[in-house]
Amino acid sequence: IVALLLGGLAPTLSSQVEQRQLTETRTQLDTVRDALIGFTLINGRLPCPASGTSNGLESPVGTGVCTNFTDGFVPAVTLGLSGTSATGYIEDAWGNPFRYAVSSLDIVGPPIINNVFTTPSGISDAGITNLNPVDLIVCSEASANGNSCSVADSDLSLSTAAVIYSIGLNGSFGGTSTDETENPNPSSVDNDSVFVSHTPSPSSAPNGEFDDIVIWISPNIEKITGTSPEW
């Protein structure tokens, strides 16, 4: 009888643990997004992603040309986030480092600014009306193109300054589905400008299992200081 009762409770407990992990991870993603926006307001630029060997620092420090524009990690040490691992990562509820991609948009002018979002003063010099980072795209399913959503009505964001995401419960081996391999992870070498976000799906879904949790930052976020809009 005890064994039967425990067996009946197991799915419920597992579901509760999974829900707690999801909630914790989403809260952490919101914290990271807030830290990135705060960093931008103070420094006039977004930080570069951390590399696999930069120990939580943006790579490189203080310059516009990032080493990992689309396949890096959250620069938790640069952002001053607590709870980092010994190697400088901030991790989701499953122990996977949070991933971070940032736009490498160049403005051809005037003015001419390369890597406008990560270059010191690049955002303010360009002005809010010129910030249109079409090189980072978020779709609701995998794309056949490296810089656009190729499936009809799958566009989620065509103007994205940065993408932050968790590779989810299956992150220890990396998602191998069509949708998950759009988001760089341990099993994927896809480091193009397209990312995928949608509700979780099982392995039986048309594009396979998906448990990534993806959020992004729009270039249209403004902070009003006096009478002047400031990104």
Image: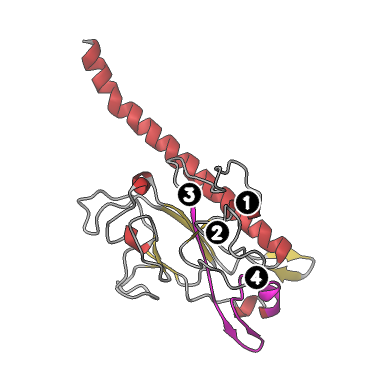
Numbered tag placed on residue 63 in the rendering = 4
Residue that badge 1 annotates: 77
Residue that badge 3 annotates: 97
Which percent across, then down, holds residue 170?
33, 46
Circle 2: is it few (<14), some (14-19), or many (20+) Cα within 10 Å? Answer: many
Q: CA distance from mark 2 to mark 1?
A: 9 Å
Residue 53 counted in the magenta span: no
User: Which of marks 1 and 4 precedes in the sequence?
Assistant: 4
User: Which of marks 1 and 2 precedes in the sequence?
Assistant: 2
Q: Type of residue at label 1?
A: Val
Residue extent of the magenta highlight: 97-125
Disc 4 is placed on an element classified as loop
Disc 3 is placed on an element classified as loop
Q: Please, which residue is most extreme toward the front here?
A: 53
Q: CA distance from mark 1 to mark 3?
A: 13 Å
User: Which of marks 3 and 2 precedes in the sequence?
Assistant: 2
Q: Residue at x 43, y 38 (%)?
A: 21
**Answer yes or no: do the residues labelled 4 and 3 have beta carbons within 8 Å?**
no
**Answer yes or no: do the residues labelled 4 and 1 have beta carbons within 8 Å?**
no
Q: Type of residue at label 4?
A: Thr
Instruction: Say which quadrant the C terminus sits in.
Output: bottom right
Frontmost residue, 167 versus 77: 77
Which percent across, then down, holds residue 222?
65, 66
